[in-house]
Amino acid sequence: MAESGITVEKLLVIEYERLKEEQKSRIGFRDNLLYVTLAAVLTLLIGSAQTRQPALLLALPVTTTVLGWTYLMNDQMISSIGRYVRTDLGPRLGALAGESGCPFGWEAAHRSDGARQWRKRMQCAVDLLAFAVVPIAALVTFWTRGGGNDLTLAGSLLEALAVLVLAVQIVRYLDTSE
């Protein structure tokens, strides 16, 4: 490898740069999913109200569950990239440079902010509101308005289960550690 001019240090820096690019891309995509969810929720609620078709509300839990799962998986990958840089890649690069620990100060510094835990809990609440509370409210509205048959009732119960599984996963993936 030395003959080609590429050193281990250069390879690790390239890996870091690529990971940060992927992380940045995933952050933008993840954050836009909240706007897409809001637009989908409003569209479905307005459509249901205008047509007086409570069955349209059944599209809301499916939509928010798919978007919420995609949001959660992107968020998890963003966190995994950061953890890998802090605990594996950074220390390996630091060791090659004769330093101990991760040489990328920001990777740890932004996590030690005193308000981080509060922000993470508030984000969890927003995520639960968007991806769990709103669809459950739509299901409750559908159930109380009636008009469904046995098949739509069974489908709505499966939707409720899917939303609850997603809600549990959102809370499970909450990371308030430093």
Image: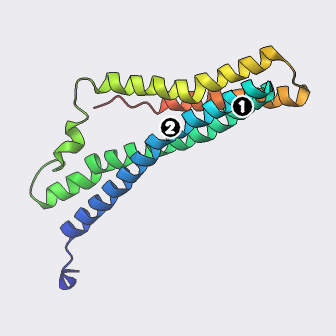
Task: Give me the residue at 70% from left, 26% from top.
Answer: 160
Where residue 35 is drawn, which disc sits there?
Answer: 2
Question: Residue farthest to the front?
Answer: 50
Between disc 1 and disc 2, whose residue precedes?
2
Q: Tell me the kind of residue under disc 1.
A: Gly
Q: Is residue 160 above or below residue 144?
A: below
Q: Is residue 13 left or right of residue 53?
A: left
Task: Give me the residue at 73% from left, 24% from top.
Answer: 49
State the quadrant of the N terminus. bottom left
Q: Quadrant of residue 139?
A: top right
Q: Tell me the kind of residue under disc 2.
A: Tyr
Label 2: state its secondary structure. Answer: helix
Q: Is residue 161 visible?
A: no
Label 1: state its secondary structure. Answer: helix
Q: Quadrant of residue 16?
A: bottom left
Q: Is residue 84 visible?
A: yes
Question: Residue farthest to the top?
Answer: 144
Q: CA distance from mark 1 to mark 2?
A: 18 Å
- Relative to the observer, which residue lies in front, 95 or 114? 114
Question: Residue farthest to the right?
Answer: 149
Q: Which residue is mark 1?
A: 47
